[in-house]
Image (spheres, helix red, strand yellow):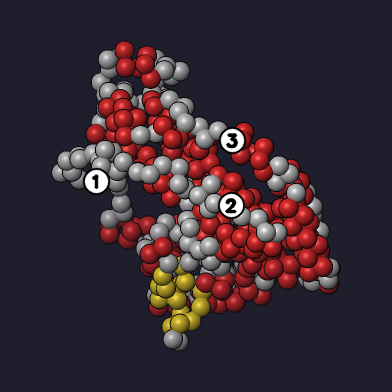
Amino acid sequence: RLLKNKLEDLKTIVDEKTIDTYKMTVHQKDLRCGELLTKKSKIEYNFLNQKDKTVEGFANQILNANSITYDKRSKEYKYIVRSVYQMVLAMVDYEVSSIRNDFNDSWALENILKDTDSTETKIEGKTDKLKTVINEYLTERENLKAINPRSLVEEIAILKLFSDIVGNITIKNLDDEAVKKYKRTLFKLPPHRSKRKELIGKSVKELLEMNLKPIGNRTVENHCQKIKSFLIWLVDQHYINSNYSKILSVKTKKSKRQSTRTYFTEHDLKIMFSPDNYPLTSVDKRNANDANYWVPIIGLFTGARLNEICQLMVDDVRQAKNIWVFDFNSDGIKKSLKTDASARLVPIHKQIIDLDFLDYLKLIKKLVPIVKNSG
């Protein structure tokens, strides 16, 4: 009831704050919503990675204002903090919906209200089973965009196998013996269990009884690395006390074989970008749809990844100390980089400028102003 009342108070504040949004242009609304969604992502990241105590501090303010005290190690206190976290996120969503005058997401608020109606019932009914916590872990990683869709599919399969081997046990029973059992079993399982017709649908026990050639050590190492990350998260979330990283260590010999990855040779590039195949001359400046022309050129002179080039915004092409640069960053909705170190400034090669790329940039700014913020 306490959290429900606080949520209604916050909703009223948002309503007052957004009462004049009808005066905003569509562009201004988009900018404001982008700022709010970025703020939401930061709140999620900081809370889930325990980077700061802002949400916990807010929860403490609510409790202290009502003279309520909980042991900070108790499930009750943890539940209150998590509920406040969900409440804060719901308020950001509500403000975005208010600005856009689109309340299709209002159900999220109702869910929060329902979830906070009875803290005691929630806590008593909570069962920290392995599969439940795995789902929580994956949901957080997906929400934080900490994993791409392809890797997510792989991680789901690896964590499902982990729960299949050790069983859907209560998290408090996830100990060193369970982890050792997982590693021992993993070394005996056959590869491609989800692809080979004769293996699809087989239980772990049935697969072991077939005595097939086991998966390779590198695959085992990959699985163990993914499980390590999950166990580290469990420790961070105070579900368990050890991540058992030493148990999951797998030593594999590095292959002396050359990488099978193919690449373009200098000869290949000369053929691809020869005048006959790729006109390295000024393109039609009247055409605002020449992205297909520029992407390979930028890749040739910067070595940037395809997704890094395709997500460049107009503002990402700028001057730094009087030098034109590409600013590869993850600032903005739906932008991402492979690693934090991938954020960088790359000077624009003279050849690109000589091809009238800056004139093309001016054309885009003039014809499609929204590109400046939407990418």
Q: Disc 3 versus disc 1: distance between alpha carbons?
A: 48 Å
Q: Report the front residue among 92 and 324.
A: 92
Label 3 element class: loop
Q: Report the front residue among 127 and 191.
A: 127
Q: Quadrant of the C terminus?
A: bottom right
Label annotation for residue 231: none
Residue 156's spot in the image, x, y percent?
47, 36
* Earlier-in-chain disc, 2 versus 1: 2
Q: Is residue 362 above or below residue 203?
A: below
Q: Disc 3 versus disc 2: distance between alpha carbons?
A: 18 Å
Residue appearing at x 34%, y 37% in the figure: 223
Task: Say left or right for 241 vs 7.
Answer: left
Label annotation for residue 126: 3
Residue 168's spot in the image, x, y percent?
47, 27
Q: Is residue 229 above or below residue 367?
A: above
Residue appearing at x 66%, y 75% in the figure: 366
Q: Is residue 323 visible?
A: yes
Label 1 element class: loop
The residue under label 2 is 70
* Earlier-in-chain disc, 3 versus 2: 2
Residue 152's spot in the image, x, y percent?
47, 41
The residue under label 1 is 259
Q: Is residue 34 visible?
A: no
* Earlier-in-chain disc, 3 versus 1: 3
Identified by mark 2, the residue type is Tyr
Residue appearing at x 57%, y 59% in the figure: 56
Identified by mark 1, the residue type is Ser
Query: How would you rate the neighbour count of disc 3 (Cα within 10 Å): few for under 14, some for 14-19, many for 20 or more?
Result: few
